[in-house]
Image (tube, rainbow, N blue to C red):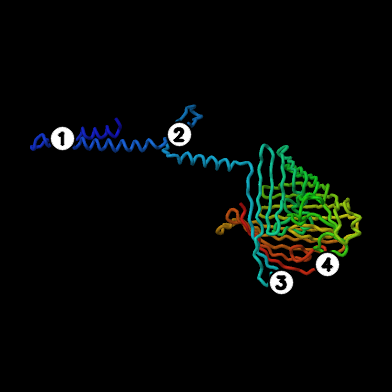
Amino acid sequence: MSKSLIFAATVLAASPVVVSAQGANSVEQEIQALKERLAELEKRLSEKQEREEKVVIVEKRKIEKDETSGKDAKRQTLVYDSGAHARLEELEQKTQENENWPIKVHGAIRFQYEYNNYDSDNENRTGDLDFDIFRLNFDGEMGGVILSAEYRWFNYQDVVKHAWFGYDFTDKLQGQVGVVKIPFGNMPYNSHSYFFNSTFYVGLEDEHDNGIRFKYRGDDWDFDLAYLKSDEQGGIDGATSDRTARYNYDTVGIRLPGQGAFDEPGLSVGESNSYAFRTARKFNFSDKENLELGVSVQGGNLYSGTAADGFTEAQAFENQNVGNRLAWSAHGIYNNGPWNVQLQYSDYDYDIKLENRGVYMAAYAYYDAIPAEAKLYTANVAYTMPVDIGPLTSLTFYNDHSLMTDKMGYQDDTWMNVLGVAVAAGGGFYTYVDYVRAKNQPFIGGNTATDGGEVNDRFNINFGYYF
């Protein structure tokens, strides 16, 4: 008999039966009414049990080991579930598997407001707000093999920034193969602002090419060695429809006499069989104060393709090694609490067999000439301040300055100064606010391989969400 029936019967048995003067008939009627009530209760209980039989009873036992006493403690939990619990467990398992997937997918989406004084249309419109970039990153490790890749979409191009496979030979030595970062100068960047420094626009900052790289990170020393077979598009014979569609600046042509600063190259070339070496000595004075001093060198050959129509003299230099390039740098980074200071000197030289006015670099969907030889000086300082203002979490104030001198064939120097602040907010929102003042500087109304340029100004806000 069920507990409910036992309880009902007990209640009935304990209830006093009072016989009044009206006689036995009234007592019998009362007993009959109680029997009918008991039958009704039994029916309702039976219906309740039938409903409960449709419910799956899942019993979970979690045994917790008491290591000190050596005894097992049992805790039992009953979960009543009509199937939803099983589906929930399946979803939780899939979520956990996705979170533990060895390749992490992340990225960013950014927009940009620009106001400058060298584009009259932009100035008349009081600046422009445009979509800047959507990017996806893939990073992780599978079976001991490391993967890192980044692909970027712009309004006018889509490009690979880097894409390589790697392996950790030891906890300090890593090898990489694919589109790898060229080790050179202050790393990972020789700048703090959205605009980098002038070193970026001559291919000496945040540069990536096809090849192999070995990276050693010790307690006191860093060493990097790389062999680059070609640029990220495959060099002079790479299967690409647009040689300007790339993230970083690569040498893609020779600027022949009579050509403009932004023309298509009179003789196309591609970087090949290049090398790079970087070393840095690290000094840790305290948890908050450290210094890094280093030197870097890179070089390689230039192989030519087909000369453009009208450049008959250049046809004699088609499909061969037409020269080489060499660059070196001395650099240093000093950190003291919230302060960061970067200093760098760089020197590059193109030794080209035919008469020229410099070389053409390509990136961001256009050609841009640079001198065949020049020296670059950069000096940057930044101060990072944690804040708690609404969604704001930190402000990094900075001033980056670069100077390009001794340009072969040109008299006027190139210089750029970027005064700005980087704002972090909301756990993933990041904004660069930059005021740029420059002369003969790409993206600020000028070009490094020209004379007589004007001093230009640009106010720029680049903002986006990183996920």
Q: Are marks 4 and 1 in contact (CB under 8 Å)?
A: no
Q: Amino acid at mark 4?
A: Asp
N-term mark: 2 or 4: 2
Q: Which mark is in front, 2 or 4?
A: 2
Q: Is residue 348 left or right of residue 152?
A: right
- Determine whether the residue tagged by mark 1 lies in a helix, strand or loop: loop
Identify the residue at image location x=73%, y=69%.
118
In this picture, is 152 found above or below 219? below
Residue on which disc 3 sits: 120
Give me the C-alpha separation between circle 2 and circle 3: 73 Å
Q: Which mark is in front, 4 or 3?
A: 3
Residue on which disc 2 sits: 60
Give me the C-alpha separation between circle 4 and circle 1: 120 Å
Please state the total of marks drawn on the protein image.
4
N-term mark: 4 or 1: 1
Q: Which quadrant does the N terminus fall into?
A: top left
Identify the residue at image location x=67%, y=64%.
460
Q: Is residue 404 visible?
A: yes
What label sits on residue 17 in the rendered view?
1
Corner quadrant of residue 347: bottom right
What label sits on residue 198 in the rendered view?
none
Q: Is residue 190 left or right of residue 77?
A: right
Residue on which disc 4 sits: 451
* Crowd tier of the residue under label 3, counting other residues whose Cα lies within 10 Å: few below 14, some 14–19, many 20 or above: few
- Determine whether the residue tagged by mark 3 lies in a helix, strand or loop: helix
Q: Is residue 372 visible?
A: no
N-term mark: 1 or 3: 1
Q: Are marks 1 and 3 in contact (CB under 8 Å)?
A: no
Q: Amino acid at mark 3?
A: Ser
Q: Is residue 84 left or right of residue 399?
A: left
